[in-house]
Amino acid sequence: MSSDVSATGLSRVTALVVRAGLALTVLGSLALLLSGIGSRWDWWNYRTGFVIFRATLYGGLGVIVVVLAGLVLALLARTGRSILLALATLALLAGVAAVPVGHLRAAGRVPPIHDITTDLDDPPRFVAVLSLRRDAPNSAEYAGPALAAQQRAGYPDLGPARFVAPPATVLARATEVAHGLGWQIVATDAGEGRLEATDRTRWFGFRDDVVVRVRPEGTGSRVDVRSVSRVGRSDLGTNARRIRAFVDALRASFGETR
């Protein structure tokens, strides 16, 4: 009789722990989602989004302990339903953790910079977007040789793109490509061969500014791109990826490849 009571008590405790783990995992999922949505939709300052993001990451460590404890209890109690629920919760927890862990891994693989250009000696300059960046924590002024050295070490593949088409044709095609990538065009100056635009990051919706410069080179054109984040010390590689995507799309629009 007492063994039956003990087994029943263990099953109840197990069910409570497993359900608590699931509830905490669901709450963590919602918090993680809100950290990005709230920042993107301007419900709060991006710093608040960062706080929620970090809290979700650190809180997730505690949730792992709860869920694993529930799984151990379920195995001891031999309650199939609780075992399946605990395993499903672990799978959900792994999916939720993939987002912050991915950000941390990206931060460790790239230099902590946020101003990337294909021309380190003469970076394209912003003109039209400067008024939009007036209150931005990050400056639009290029930081010089120290920044260039960090980029060379982190992104040695980045460089100018060259086309046989004349600058006017390339600039027009670049504008079409920028539209296709979802950039918000701020200004185009055919006389100076300059395109300026703003793009947003996928998760937090941070606004990054891009300038494309097209210059004549021989009988063709040379294209340089610069992408700069308005906030944050490290861009986690976002600006370099954006430049690569743009150049690849521009080349593809002319039927060219690397």
Image (cartoon, rainbow, N blue to C red):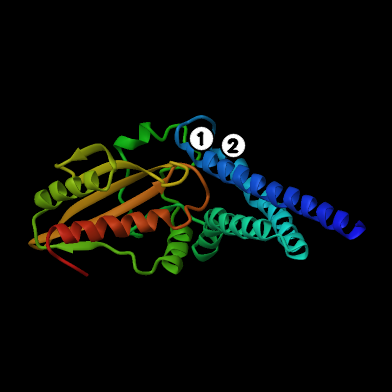
Tell me what residue is drawn at x 8 percent, y 55 percent: 166
Q: Position of residue 33 (x, y in %)?
A: 52, 42
Q: Which mark is residue 48?
A: 2
Tell me what residue is drawn at x 27 percent, y 42 percent: 196
Q: Residues within 10 Å of mark 2 (few under 14, many from 20)?
A: some
Q: Which mark is residue 38?
A: 1
* Front-lying residue, 85 or 220: 85
Quadrant assignment, res 126: top left
Looking at the rendered structure, the secondary structure element under dot 2 is helix
Considering the image in quadrants, where does the N terminus appear? Answer: bottom right
- Evaluate whether residue 44 shows in this view: yes
- Decide if residue 257 is on the left or right side of residue 9: left
Tell me what residue is drawn at x 18 percent, y 44 percent: 192
- Decide if residue 47 is on the left or right side of residue 129: right
Residue most extreme to the front: 1
* Front-lying residue, 240 or 23: 23
Mark 2 near mark 1, Cβ–Cβ under 8 Å?
yes
- Evaluate whether residue 50 shows in this view: no
